[in-house]
Amino acid sequence: MNIPDHLKYTADHEWVSIEGDVATVGITDFAQGELGDIVYVEIETEGETIAKGELFGTIEAVKTVSDLFMPVSGEVLEFNEELESEPELVNSDPYDDGWMIKIKVSDLAEADDLLSAEAYKELIGQ
């Protein structure tokens, strides 16, 4: 299971990479493995400001649909448009090509509440 040390994580299985005041968000390797083959990613919140913990989109796998939650508050700046034609990138490369959104973070202090790689590993029993 790939859980990069340099990222932060949520209990809802999103990962976050923050550079300055911009965060890149996706779902973890664990989450994509649990979901199975991803067939669709729906994110229609580009340009919206969304609070931490609120819904920013959904991800559909062959057998289920799961909600995606904001790890930190902010404005959704960008959606990974590659996922429209290749949603399977979330399965094959969840931390790079399979990223989902970029956020202009409203309150960087919220990132302090995110899980470290070690804490996330404990959460999923690794």
Image (spheres, rainbow, N blue to C red):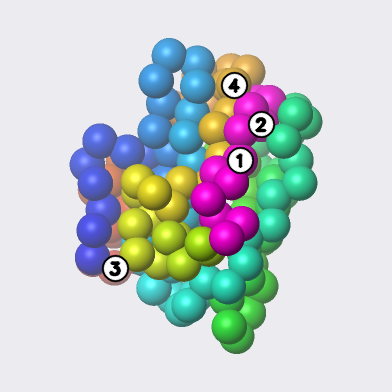
Toward the front, the furthest residue is 85
Q: Determine the secondary structure under disc 1.
A: strand
The reply to whether discs 1 and 2 touch (Cβ–Cβ < 8 Å) is yes
As for residue 23 lying within the magenta part, the answer is: no
Q: Determine the secondary structure under disc 4.
A: strand
User: Which residue is rendered at x = 66% and y = 31% of the image?
Assistant: 76
Please indicate, yes or no, whether residue 10 appears anywhere in the rendered image.
no
- 58 or 123: which is nearer to us? 58
For residue 73, what is the image quadrant? top right
- The span from disc 4 to disc 2 (Cα, nearest Å) is 7 Å
The reply to whether discs 4 and 3 touch (Cβ–Cβ < 8 Å) is no
Q: Residues within 10 Å of mark 1 (few under 14, many from 20)?
A: many
Q: Residues within 10 Å of mark 2 (few under 14, many from 20)?
A: many
Query: Disc 1 designates what residue?
Result: 79
Say if 84 sits above or below 53 in the image. below
The reply to whether discs 4 and 1 touch (Cβ–Cβ < 8 Å) is no
Of label 4 and label 1, which has the lower sequence position? 1
- The span from disc 4 to disc 1 (Cα, nearest Å) is 12 Å
- 92 or 9: which is nearer to us? 92
Give the residue type at disc 3.
Answer: Gly
Q: Which residues are magenta?
A: 73-85
Q: Which mark lies nearer to you, 4 or 1? A: 1
Q: Which mark lies nearer to you, 4 or 3? A: 4
The reply to whether discs 4 and 2 touch (Cβ–Cβ < 8 Å) is no
Numbered mark located on residue 104 in the image: 4
Query: Disc 3 designates what residue?
Result: 125
Query: Disc 2 designates what residue?
Result: 76
Give the residue type at disc 1.
Answer: Phe
